[in-house]
Image (cartoon, coloured by chain):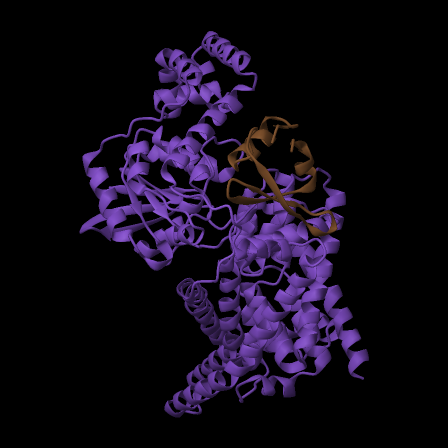
Amino acid sequence: MRDVCGGKDVRARLASMGLLPGVVLEVIVRGPLGGPVLVQVDGTRLALGRALARKVLVEP
Amino acid sequence: MTIVLAGQPNCGKSTIFNAVAGYLSATANFPGTSLSLTTSQVSVAGREVEVVDLPGTYSLTAHHEEAERRALAYLCEAQPSVIVNVVDATRIGRSLELTLQLLELRRPVVVALNMLDEAARKGLEIDTAALARELGVPVVATVAHRGTGLVELFAAAVDAADRGAAPAPPRYDREVEEAAARVSTTLGALAGAATLLPARLAALKLLERDGRVVAALAAHGPALADGVESVVAELEQRRGWPAEQVVSGARHALAHRIENAVIATSPARRSRRERLDVVLMHPVFGLPLLLCVLAVFFVSVFGLGRVLEAPIVRAFELLAAALGGWLPADSAAGAVVRGVVLGLSGGVAIALPYLLPFLAGLSALEDSGYLPRIAYLLDGALHRFGLHGTSIVPLILGYGCSVPAVMSTRILEHRRDRTIAALLATMVPCSARTTVILGLVGAVLGLVPALLVYVVNIAVVACVALALQRRLPGSPPGLVLEVPDLRPPSARTMAAKTWLGLKEFILVAWPALIVASVVLGLLEAARLDARVNDLLAPLTVTALGLPPALGLTLVFGVLRKELALMMLVQALGITAVGTEALAGALTPPQVMAFALFVVFYVPCIATLAALWREAGARAALGAAALTSALALVIAVAGRFVTTLLAG
């Protein structure tokens, strides 16, 4: 993960769940009907709404 | 002595609390279930202590999360004797981020390294002694849902509280430490005193630009805040990230360094259970699978209900006969008591067979970790109805009981989202209403019509959601939900939760039923019941086509929804016990109309009170009005459709 394109609140929310710049994200599956993305960070699985997921900038 | 249990969500904290305090805390692999503090007086290691279960929080950087604010506020104000930090052994890195913040509070800390069975299953070997050394506090290994290690844990906690030694605060990297030192010598102490935080923690929060702490400092003089700002700016410049990210990054780095130091092996393989998620949450297969799971759920609950009905009915028949033998046949008192007995036995015999499997099934679903997956699968669909993300949590909780569902709306940030979610959560059938649906429609008309009621309900909730979203515009937040590991539900937890639900039914619904039955009996004796029923006749008879006697049951239903069903027996003057008797007394259109009306109309008093508290008087009254109007329309429609289909 490289960065989050959002304000302080969004950053803090994601950070508290373990999504900080520099961590390794693994996308496991995408949800039905434009639903959330299931990612694995550091042994934890998180469901991220699509819109929110788009704000998370990653590099492979 | 106060022992506080703190930890991230789903770490097993509430399981530990329940193990010592008796089943008081709701535990579910689901956010929003542990939102309020629970306390209990417990005898631990021979001493009387107060144990407090805090809401699960990911961190103490209290931004807008209600649970975090409360947890931090409690920890600062209450000054507990010892903090027991429950850590999920399968995710030490992330859990330690909270641990490190707890260490900053300068209170004795003991770490409970929980879920070691899960860690072992994943091939993780953890050196607890090394962890204790790194953190500078005692670490006790536990497996909470089996009860292992709890005695040692609380003994260690009491010991730490007695010694009263505060652990050394964690040391981050040089730049952060320097910045913190520069701030804390003068300013941190000032801000800390105002906000009840230790100086160093206040300094770190000032660096993070925590609004509350900065405001507390500014109250002493704006120049002080400027002084902090220059330190913060310098830190940002050196590191190239916003300050709060520097601090949280430092904490994260330390947590992971410790994690790597104490874990012996890390698995690269993905276990079977993890691979299951690719199927369960699949974009194409996920929803059909969800429907299958729900179908299995309802069919099992209903099937078990059918099976249980006969023996329960028999038991109550015997009871009614036995009691009937004691009472004088002709006195008014005798009539009232007989009414009560009949009402009680009839009512319970109809409700209990379906309530029991439903509670058991729901607890299994909760414990297995499937509920967050349901939220995940439905999020995409819910978007179209203006419900985003975590708004689904109250809706799912509503299938259990509306009161905790309404309370769980606190996890939503904006007022608008909270109000909408609270209202919709009360429209979904709670277990009491499920009892009515299964026990009346299901038992008399069959499983398919019963399921149809659920489908209609969901459709109506969706329409209301759409309408509300137009009237109250705003953009809801995105979903960020932790999806915990799937695990087979523990029989112990299931039994405890089912018993909890059952206890509530017995301790609250039965007395309510008895009181209501007595009142009804008295009204009947005084011939007043007919008057009330006549008043309600335009509703009950004309619109819904029901026998006039049902008017009063609807009134009682406002107290508790099950009462509407359970009092049918007494109201209709049925002397036999069981659903065949109901089938004889009511026609299919009447059954449908009644059930639909009960499912939708005014939330029960407890729920109205919760709505009033959480969303305000206007929301509560609005809900009452809206739901009653909807109930009328839907029930009438149901009546006519059923008449058409039956005829």
* Residue at 35 percent of width and 45 percent of height: B113
Image height of B575 relative to B17, above or below: below
Q: Colour of chain A?
A: brown
Badge count: 0
Image height of B408 relative to B185, above or below: below
Q: Is residue B99 left or right of residue B575?
A: left
The quadrant of the picture occupied by the N terminus of chain B is top left
Q: Colour of chain B?
A: purple
* Residue B80 in which image quadrant: top left
Q: Is residue B405 left or right of residue B206?
A: right
Q: Is residue B302 left or right of residue B547?
A: left
Residue A47 image point, x, y percent: 60, 45
* Residue at 53 percent of width and 38 percent of height: A17
> Viewer-proximal residue, B466 or A28?
A28
Residue B641 image point, x, y percent: 79, 74
* Residue at 75 percent of width and 64 percent of height: B633
